Image: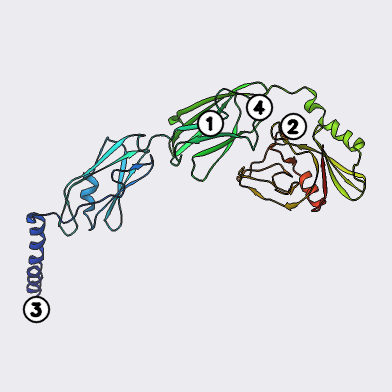
Amino acid sequence: MPKIKKLFFLIALSIPTLLTSVYIYAFSPTFVSMPTADKNGHEILPTETFTITFDTAIDKSYYQKKISLSPRTPMKAVINDNHTQITIIPTHGWNINTKYTISIPEGRAKNFTRLSNASFNFTVTDYPHVIDIIPHSGAKNVQLGIEDPITVQFDKSTEGFYIDFNLQPDVPVIYQNNITKTRFDLLPQEPLQANTTYTLTLYAKTDGTSDDNYTPLHTTTFTTLLPKPKTWRENLQDKLIEAKKTTQAKITTGKYIDINLTTQIMTIFENGKNKGSFLISSGKPGMNTPKGTHKIYNKHPRPWSKKYGLYMPYWMAITPSGKYGIHELPEWPGGYKEGANHLGIKVSHGCVRLGVGPAQTIYNWAEIGTPVIIY
């Protein structure tokens, strides 16, 4: 077939298809597709995207230019490789607690069929609100510890936000949150001053935004305990040396553990001989360590306390129920450990805490059944 005839033949074949497409787009009384969006009418996070889905491939260049957003906010519209989805992405995050409307005009698919116009809306969630803080505002005689941290409870998840905690007088804090990100536990990374009023202020901003965007959420105050007598900590090391020399064995056969709650000192004996003395931290008033003659009921190198959400390294139970025991300074899951500055002070919830090193030493030395005398 001559080339000119072949070209004419191909054009002739294309005309019916082209005319059909033009007819469908220009004269069809109904629209072929109505776009949808899963999050239409829903509440979304400040950095969350919004996706519009079509059941047929769309004209990319047309839709990228025609989408409108109210109120106007910097954003970009990204169309997927199949040209069936448009994802609206905020450039710097959506405005907090704001209702948005996305409008797309009547358009066309790649095959020239008509697509309906549509309007969608979503609301950006407000900042999470504080519903409870412990210690409560105005609390007196506060003594913080890993079993008694500052606890902040929010009304909803803080996902999508960055929460900042500021403690004044200026003390850096460390924190952890729970799985749902509705609760934070905070501890100062330095000892707090005695008989001092502290102010804790909470701030929030959207993830990914600058620090200039922090918004105050909540403020609370508390006052720490009155100072202990000057000799309370000044003579602890002297007491430790003295205990090694003067503590008398109450059991002279085999091993036993001697715990003096007054001096906050543990001494271990074997066949009546002093094998070492160590600073401890026993139960605070109202959560006293039980006095009397006990024994080691069980041991575990690193058990998890579900009650307190803490690891208790080198655990040795001293009561049958396992409520009380001897262990190393407890740890948060993230690795933060209770400060050694609490050793020599009654701050625990009844257990006997030991420092890093001594706890492992005694754990390896004592067997199950070893007597424990507490007085």
Q: Reading the chain from its start, which is encountered first: label 3 or label 2? A: 3
Q: Please name the amino acid that badge 2 sits on.
A: Ile
The residue under label 4 is: 192
> Is residue 210 visible to the viewer in this orientation of the structure?
no
State the image quarter where residue 114 is shown: bottom left
Q: Reading the chain from its start, which is encountered first: label 4 or label 1? A: 1
Residues under numbered marks 4 and 3 in contact, where contact means CB atoms less than 8 Å apart: no
Q: How far apart, in angstroms, are the residues tagged by discs 1 and 2?
A: 25 Å
The colouring scheme, among rainbow, by chain, secondary structure or one colour, is rainbow
The residue under label 2 is: 345
Q: How far apart, in angstroms, are the residues tagged by discs 4 and 3?
A: 97 Å
In this rendering, the label closer to the viewer, 4 or 3? 4
In this rendering, the label closer to the viewer, 4 or 1? 1
Local SS, label 2: loop
Q: How far apart, in angstroms, are the residues tagged by discs 2 and 4?
A: 14 Å
Quarter the C terminus occupies: top right
Q: Residues within 10 Å of mark 3 (few under 14, many from 20)?
A: few
Residue 361's spot in the image, x, y percent? 80, 48
Residue nearest the observer in this picture, 102 or 227: 227
Q: How far apart, in angstroms, are the residues tagged by discs 3 and 2?
A: 104 Å
Residues under numbered marks 4 and 1 in contact, where contact means CB atoms less than 8 Å apart: no
Local SS, label 4: loop
Q: Please name the amino acid that badge 4 sits on.
A: Leu
State the image quarter where residue 374 is shown: top right
Q: How far apart, in angstroms, are the residues tagged by discs 1 and 3?
A: 89 Å
Residues under numbered marks 2 and 4 in contact, where contact means CB atoms less than 8 Å apart: no
In this rendering, the label closer to the viewer, 3 or 2? 2
The residue under label 1 is: 133
Q: Reading the chain from its start, which is encountered first: label 1 or label 3? A: 3
